[in-house]
Structures are given as C-alpha cells and as structure tokens.
Amino acid sequence: MRWAGVVLAGGEARRMGGGDKPLLRVAGRSLLGRVLDRLGGHGRPLAINTRGDAVRFESFGLSVLPDGPLGAGPLAGVLAAMDWAAGLDCDAVLTVPGDTPFIPRDLPMALAPAPAVAVSGGRRHHLVALWPVAARTALRDRLAATGGNAPRAAFGVRAFAETIGMRDVAFPEQTVDPFFNVNSPADLAEAARLAALTGAD
C-alpha cells in the first residue's frame, strides 16, 4: 500500500473561542506537532490541510493544502487530501484531525486496507480514516452536486463513507483513548493531565 498522511487543521474551534486549535500547546508542544510526530515514523509524505493563510503553519516544513472550491466542511479537506495523494501516486490517504494528540503510532497499518475508520469505546471517529484515492471522483461529484448546501445527514463524512464501504476498525481500550480530541479549554487541560500521566511525548 502506498499511502500519504494529511492532518486536517481547518476547523473553526468555536468551543475554544476561535483561532488555530492545532497550534495550542500541551506540555510545551503543539497539538499539531504531537500528531505529526506520531505519523512521522513511517517515511511517508505528510501534509497539513487548512483554510486561510498557509504562513502560520510554515514552521512545520510541510505542504499546506487549501480546501478546494466545492464546498466547506471536513469533506472538502478530505478531497484536498485525496487530490494531493493522487499526485504522489498513492493508493490511499490517511486523514487525522489536528486535535488528536494521542493517536497510535501504528495507525496506518492498523487501518489498512482502505477504506477504514477508527473506532474506540464504541464511537466511530469519522475523520481518523484511511481513504482510497480512487474515491476522489465520487467525492468531487458529491460536493459539486450539492454545492455544500445539502442537509448535514446527506452531506456529512459518515454519509459519504458509507457509500464507499468504509470498514470499522476497533482499537482496544487503553489508559488514554487514542482518539481523544481537544474541543474545549477543559479538554486541553485534560490532555495535559493525560500526557503527564502516561508520559506521552
């Protein structure tokens, strides 16, 4: 399997009061830096997907992928990731939100083959997924047909994933949920506590 990885860092972070949530720090390191470190041991291409000025992420030394013109929301980021990976002649692209600092280091191998999505504690983490690059035409057509204005249930990540036969891959319970994500100031404090508890780098 030839894969590339893309960290989705374009959320609006409303519960954090706005700004770039992946740049928030836990125990001296940004959430984004922690995610990239956990993905970086495989020798595969990595990129960041976001909206707005790419300069704020230039210190990470990676390609920054803007969303395309076919609608807002996370599926636009997934399409940008697929298109970038296709240009690298990859079969699949791994997407991970930029606010998940404890993702497993073996995540790509555990999810293979695509399409597959991570599940923990009975919850499906729709954007922690390995997508087949071949699905990009179907996704582009879906975004173009709705213009991003279809009801959430019809237009969301889960609905599209079901159309391509996305498999669930369950991860065992651990001291720390590997897909714990930071959505609020309380979550940020909890991430710092968990990092100290587990010694997670």
Image: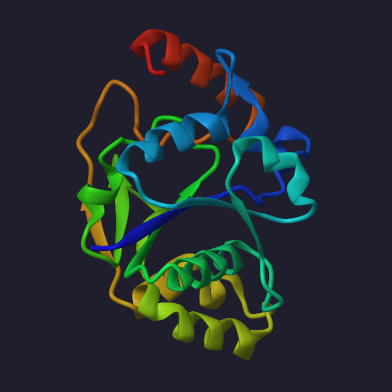
Is 5 situated left or right of 176 in this image?
Answer: right
Q: Where is residue 78 in the image (x, y as percent from the top left)?
A: 52, 65
Q: Going 66% across and 32% down the picture, which residue do you hit?
A: 23
Q: Is residue 111 visible?
A: yes
The answer to which of 55 and 166 lies nearer the viewer is: 55
Tell me: residue 180, above or below residue 68: above
Task: Report the quarter where the C terminus lies.
Answer: top left
Q: Position of residue 44 (x, y in %)?
A: 36, 50
Tell me: residue 2, above or below residue 46: below
Q: Where on the picture, by quarter, is residue 71?
A: bottom right
Q: Position of residue 12 (x, y in %)?
A: 72, 48
Q: Going 47% across and 35% down the picture, which residue do you hit?
A: 35
Is 149 situated left or right of 32 in this image?
Answer: right
How is the protein colored in the picture? rainbow
Q: Going 48% across and 29% down the picture, which residue do you hit?
A: 34
Q: Going 40% across and 30% down the picture, which residue do you hit?
A: 102
